[in-house]
Amino acid sequence: MGWETTKLNFQRVVAVTGLPGLYMLRSHNQTGFLIEPLTGGVVQFISNAKNRIAALGNIDLALEEGSIPIIEVFKLLNEVDLIPSHGASNVILYEFFKQLIPELSESKVYPSTMKKVLYWYSLLVNHFSDASIKDSIDEKEEGLSII
């Protein structure tokens, strides 16, 4: 798993519908994708017919007007000292995210989404160095657009 020491590319870190966690995109073709769990494990093939994937670099959260890329949310989280657990209550999550992003749309961003954001951020922090995450967040990426 040599990718752990390479520069983090948010176009290659993906979420897969129906599967928990985050995955590194290894390859793709017309019928599907080869993915590897961020937490380690075997590379697996997932079919386009059954699964959808979303690169973190392509995910946004809704604001009252417009949206904010999830990478910008990670950047904000990088600067916070105390982040609630992704298992925190909905009230705590709403309060935290409203302080973090005052313009966040409460009607469009559900607690389940907030929990995913915090869970994904903790996975990234646990599996990549802080410097790698900060460097990747601070740079504009030109990645493979697969979605």
Image (tube, rainbow, N blue to C red):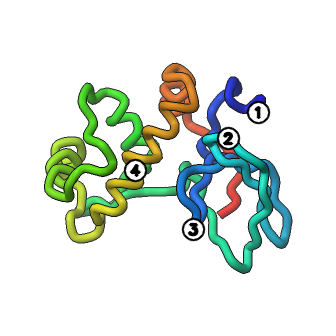
Q: Is residue 129 above or below residue 142?
A: above
SS label for mark 3: loop
Amino acid type shown at disc 4: Val
Is there CB contact under 8 Å for labels 4 and 3? no
User: Which numbered tag is attached to residue 40?
Assistant: 2
Q: Which residue is the site of mark 4? A: 117
Closer to the chain start, of discs 3 and 1, is 1
Mark 4 crowdedness (10 Å alpha carbons): few <14, some 14-19, many ≥20: some
**Image position, residue 139 (x, y; %):** 54, 31
Amino acid type shown at disc 2: Gly
The picture quadrant where one finds residue 121 is top left
Left or right, 113 with respect to 46, comes to left
SS label for mark 1: loop
Closer to the chain start, of discs 3 and 2, is 3
User: Which numbered tag is attached to residue 1?
Assistant: 1
User: Which numbered tag is attached to residue 116?
Assistant: none
Residue at coordinates 66% horizontally, 72% vertically from top-left?
51
Camera-side residue of 94 and 11: 94
Residue at coordinates 26% horizontally, 25% vertically from top-left?
81
Camera-side residue of 69 and 17: 17
Q: Which residue is the site of mark 3? A: 17
